[in-house]
Image (cartoon, helix red, strand yellow):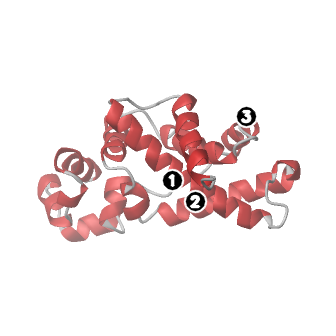
Amino acid sequence: MEEAAVGIAYEEGVHAVTVDRICEVAMVSRSTFFNYFPSLEHAIFGSALVYDPVLTERILSAHRDDLVIAASRIVMETVRGQGDDELLRKRFALFAREPGTATKVSWAAGTSRAGLQDVIVNWLDAHPASARLADADHATEARMIVNFSITLGDEVMRLVGEDGGDFPFGPAVFRAVRERMRALSVPAR
């Protein structure tokens, strides 16, 4: 069913995927579909991300000077850690071709986002010198970091899609997009 959902989305676009089409391709009933998936989006984009503490510590420590890039890399590496199969490659192709789709549509985006915020809050609590906002608590800073990282990730996926790049892609792409974001965040004089 998951292969059918991703396959239809990959071939025709996310908008073309329906529960009925998935059931037809996978030759299952609607009730069978909903026994396995709570929503259509879950079948297309997968379940909420679970972050590995060793991975997150390594990435946050390596990018302590830019936690927005760190947050985006955590998501990318976590997704990559789910396997290296055709289904994952098609999902990444979808994300690159239709930037913003996963964060707008995925039922798990809120859960994944909250989990990433918790990871960053805990890291900032353990490394307070890395906090940038003196007037805010770590939860506020983590929420803002994750929100910026979503924008960064969507733009990286758009750029990689335009360039015909393949997953995984290197940190230079993140840095280039981050510099664009930095330029836009400073008011013109």
The residue at which mark 2 appears reads as 147
- Provide the secondary structure element on which disc 2 rests: helix
Q: CA distance from mark 3 to mark 1?
A: 21 Å
Percent of width and height locating residue 14: 25, 56
- Dot 3, crowdedness within 10 Å: few (<14), some or many (≥20)? few
Asked if labels 2 and 1 touch by Cβ distance under 8 angstroms, the answer is: yes
Residue 51's disc is: none
Disc 2 marks a residue whose amino acid type is Asn
Compared with 63, 181 (above or below) is below
**In the image, 163: left or right of 10?**
right
Element marked by disc 1: helix
- Indicate the quadrant containing the N terminus: top left, top right, bottom left or bottom right: bottom left
Q: Residue at x 19, y 64 (%)?
A: 18
Pointer 2: residues within 10 angstroms few (<14), some, or many (20+)? some
- Circle nearer the N terminus (3, 1): 3
User: Toward the viewer: 142 or 152?
Assistant: 152
Label placed on residue 151: 1
Q: Is residue 65 above or below residue 151?
A: above
